[in-house]
Amino acid sequence: MTTEYGEAAMDHDEGWPRLKYYMFDWDDNILHMPTLIHLERKTDEGWKPHSVSTAEFAGIRRDTENYRPREGDWDKAFIDFYDSGVRGDQAFLEDTRRALRPIVQKEAEGAPSFQRFKKALMEGSLFAIITARAHSAKSIRRGVEYFIDSVFTDAERLQMVKNLRRFIKLFGEDGTLLTDDEVVSRYLDLNRYRGVTSPEFQELMGRSVQGAESPEHAKQFAVQDFVTHVVNIIRERGVEASVSIGFSDDDPHNVNAVVDYLNEELARQFPDVKFVVYDTSDPEHELWHKVVIRGK
């Protein structure tokens, strides 16, 4: 039997927790990754190689007049976002290490949702990583595990384990024989790690995805998959609690696509769930752009 739990703020009137779950984009939302996208840019002398960061790409990816993939091949443009490049399935972990190094050394801060993601982990929230990358779930999970190992202090990790053990008990299971590492591992097993342009995710969708330059539809599918996953956990356990599910992304196109999908589909399918969407595209805006969608 798997352990099923989530971040809970106790509601003493009803006796059940108020459950909160989260969906996070990774690049420029949790971390500013060093991975580059290899494009060509139109100049007076013709098309020239031009590599950009994910933040830069978010602003130009629809400018097909001035930018195109390297050699006309999106797979070559995004080779460092796959597990099949020169670095293989170590690419995501290596770039996560590079992104975290200056943060751990107190030389830089994370992206807008960095602290919210850390807090979600410490509190034991169930979460999904939903990224336009093409890495496998296994590769993305290794990055999350490294995040915990490198960012958390010993005291923070102990608090995380304490919260997780409390949730195991709350959901009616005996976790006394589990080691701390087993508690964390079983918690991470319950979460979703979705590289929505990966062959693995395309197979899950049952169809091909158009590519990393058009991830909105695939992210909608990943959102539905995660929401269904956590709602099923709650229903199977007979939990009567208010449920809030958040989504954050730094790309306004993805944010708008998810807001539309929640309004048109999931708010009707899950009328008891409150959805909260954050547009983190402007890191200077302290509260970002927040949309609350309630069930219909």
Image: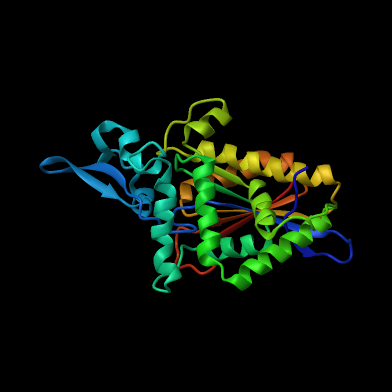
**Is residue 211 shown left or right of residue 67?**
right
Q: How is the image coloured?
A: rainbow
Question: Residue visible at 62% across and 73% down?
Answer: 155
Can residue 296 be seen from the camera position used here?
no
Pick whichever, 185 or 61, lies toward us.
185
**Is residue 202 shown left or right of residue 166?**
left
Q: Residue 279: horizontal and vertical position, in percent?
A: 52, 56
* Number of numbered discs visible in the structure rendering: 0
Question: Residue visible at 72% across and 64% down?
Answer: 163
Please, which residue is most extreme toward the left here?
Answer: 45
Q: Residue 118: horizontal and vertical position, in percent?
A: 57, 63
Pick whichever, 165 or 291, lies toward us.
165
Question: Residue visible at 39% across and 68% down?
Answer: 102
Please, which residue is most extreme toward the top here?
Answer: 207
Q: Vertically, is 116 above or below 52?
A: below
If the image is split into quadrants, where does the C terminus sit?
Answer: top right
Can residue 251 be seen from the camera position used here?
yes
**Is residue 16 shown left or right of residue 224?**
right
Pick whichever, 160 or 70, lies toward us.
160
If the image is split into quadrants, where does the N terminus sit?
Answer: top right
Find residue 109 and report its image quarter: bottom left
Q: Residue 64: horizontal and vertical position, in percent?
A: 30, 38
Question: Residue visible at 70% across and 55% down?
Answer: 183
Q: Residue 206: horizontal and vertical position, in percent?
A: 57, 25
Q: Vertically, is 157 above or below 65?
A: below
